[in-house]
Amino acid sequence: MSENKSTNELTTFTEGKVLVMERIFNAPRSLVFEAFSDSERLESWWGPKGWKTINRQFEFKPEGVWHYCMTCEDENQGDFYGQESWGMAIYHEIVAPEKIVYTDMFADDKGNAIAGMPELLVSMIFTEDGDKTKLITRSEFATLENLQQVLDMGVVQGTSSQYERLDDLLKNI
């Protein structure tokens, strides 16, 4: 599980129970950070291609809640078409435009965590790289099995796809 992989400019590797994903964006750090901290902007790109995200609750502050639903709107995605995927985050630390730390979990439409699904601690570090931004995301799982479960669900492919959507947003701002 510790070998380096690169998917559409997304570099991933594991360190024990931690999944690390790194990506460079062709935009200033403040703009990339804003794409995560502004509810409307986040809705416009969050989720894989063919999916639409609606934020039911978005409180971008320590102990604030982000509760959202992604819905597949792409008929070409077969059984995924029409499927909803609810998630929830609890923010712990926000240092604009450098860092966001939150607990991420699978949830239902009422904001209850889904039993048996992994909960993870996510740390996002935004670093300046000239006129670009390097985003380093570290997702810490309770067990190696939880990490493998999320890898098997396609987290790397999904993240790569949504970061391509973020690229499109950043080009148009």
Image: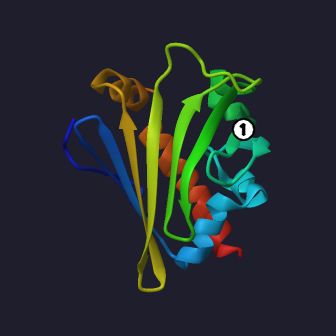
Residue type highlighted by circle 1: Tyr
The answer to which image quadrant residue 60 occupies is: bottom right
**In this view of the protein, can residue 51 be seen by the observer?**
no
- Asked which colour scheme the image uses, the reply is rainbow
Residue at the image position 62 percent from the left and 74 percent from the top: 31
- Where is residue 46? Give x, y as percent: 65, 49
Residue at the image position 55 percent from the left and 71 percent from the top: 97
- Where is residue 167? Give x, y as percent: 58, 65
| Closer-to-camera residue (89/69) | 89
- Where is residue 135? Give x, y as percent: 44, 63
Residue 68 placement, left or right of 2: right
**Location of mark 1 (residue):** 68
- Where is residue 102? Give x, y as percent: 53, 45
Query: Compared with residue 112, is residue 96 higher up or lower down, i.e. above or below?
Result: below
Residue at the image position 35 percent from the left and 30 percent from the top: 147
At numbered mark 1, what does the secondary structure look like: helix, strand or loop? strand
**In this view of the protein, can residue 88 be seen by the observer?**
yes
Q: Extreme front residue here?
A: 63
Residue at the image position 47 percent from the left and 79 percent from the top: 132
